[in-house]
Image: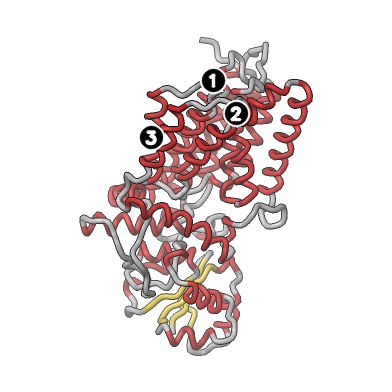
Amino acid sequence: MQLTRDHLYLFLFFALPLVYFQSLPIATSDLAIWIAMGRASLEHSSLLRHDVFSFLPTGELVYPAGICLIYGTLYGLGGLIAVSLFHKAALFGLLAMLYRASLAKLRAPWPLFNIALVLYVFLGLASFAVDRPALIALIPFLASYLLLQKEDELSLRELCALGAVQIAWVNLHGSWPLLAGMFGWRIAARAITAHRVFRSECWGLVGALAASLLNPFGYRVFPYVLETALVSRRREIDEWMPTNLHDYFPQGILFYVLVAAVVLLLIRTWRSDRAEALRILRTPYLPLLALGALSFRNTVFPFLAFLPWLQQLGRLREDARSAKAGPANLGIVVAVILAWVAFLPWVKPGLRNELPPTKRDLYAATAPWRIANYLKTAAPGRVFSDWEIGGFLALAQNDPIFMDTRNIIFSDAEFNDYSTLILAQPGWQELLRKYDVSYIALDKRAGFALIGALASQPEWALVIEEPGALLYRR
């Protein structure tokens, strides 16, 4: 078989996102707390029902237990290396689904127009290609979207597949209501624009909602998801806030350019072919754009579904040429391979307890292993930290922490205390004494006001300074 340019572009389609992902340090924040919960559940041979990591009072827990158990198992087998490789494998599977649903349907899929679209989608997805549970949730999302965007009535087999996807999704991540939302849009939009309602699909939607109950916490996952959204927005958690151009640069610009392109396409289609425009409205893609505008964390969905959506509408182009692979193309592939080898997990400093000095600036976001190791051997005591570090410390050491990224399990009063402390507002010293805090661990790069305030407090000594974190001891 002759090596063509199309083969090289296919290789780069998979290689570029994976090389980028490999180049990043492991972002442990909320990943670490889910690993810790899974490990604790496996150690006790039962799911955690109450929090065991914070010294603050919390109520009965609800969480995606399936992903916690997967993480806990992988962590026990190979530590963060195994978890990270699992995420890379998930990304590869996601790319395979994306390619099969779009470019693979074309005979010659690599004209410049398609290449530009692919690169734009990759840029939009870049901030989400990280070690977070949300990455795993993209697989059931894409699987359900590909079924729900079909114009024809869904078969019994497809409806059963949606139910199976919902069962997996509800046990993996809190974004599972999106399936029912897309399904509901499909039924309502068809009823309004085509005056047709398929009874089997209505029952399929009911079945998908019923499938959501197949999790260890039953119906309680419904108020859990609602509370997560409402509380996180009320507390102004960054990723839950509406997408704007200032706070989310450059991803916000990329998202709204995508929105503008879709709106322009819809307007032009409406003027030339209203039946086709109505078909566009019936796809579940438009509500994904609305969700992306409402919350930055949702902008990943329209980017991921963009290529399959265009393919379904027949908007992707084909290239009549299939040129031979030239020296320049081969050189690009060799460079990508070398970059990938350079960032293999087993040579990545982010997975070592001690960072090589030459790599400390590049991997400043690496988990603070030295701080965790210090706390393991130091005198026991309560730890106050920003919640990004808090999740990692819950996993990597034994002292009780104040708060982590699961902000909704803590009361408003405790969250206000956290804000008072991290911002060094009046009364912060009294709060440290109230909670009997012995250690303070903070993200050095975040520039918290508390870091400057501690510098003038002789009772707090800086004992460890990592590239990305600081540890103080009373």
Closest to the observer: 362 or 286? 286
The kind of residue tagged 2 is Trp
The kind of residue tagged 3 is Gly
Q: Residue at x 57, y 22 (%)?
A: 103
SS for dot 2? helix
Labels 2, 3: front one:
3
Q: Tell me the tag on residue 375.
A: none
The C terminus sits in image quarter: bottom left
Closest to the observer: 200 or 3? 200
Closest to the observer: 181 or 375? 181
- For marks 2 and 3 on the same chain, the one whose residue lies earlier in the sequence: 3
Marks 1 and 3, Cα distance to the nearest angstrom? 26 Å
Note whether 361 is above or below 347 in the view shown: below
In the rendered image, which residue does mark 1 sit on?
104
Marks 2 & 3, CB-CB < 8 Å contact: no
Q: Position of residue 276 (x, y in %)?
A: 68, 22
Does 136 sit left or right of 187 as displayed?
A: left
Q: Tell me the tag on residue 309.
A: 2
In the rendered image, which residue does mark 3 sit on?
163
Does 100 sit left or right of 436 as displayed?
A: right
Q: Position of residue 41 (x, y in %)?
A: 27, 57
Q: Residue at x 45, y 72 (%)?
A: 411
Mark 3 neighbour class, 10 Å CA radius: few under 14, some 14 to 19, many 20 or more: many
Marks 1 & 3, CB-CB < 8 Å contact: no
Marks 1 and 2, Cα distance to the nearest angstrom? 14 Å
Q: Residue at x 45, y 27 (%)?
A: 199
SS for dot 1? helix
Note whether 449 is above or below 295 in the view shown: below
The kind of residue tagged 1 is Ala
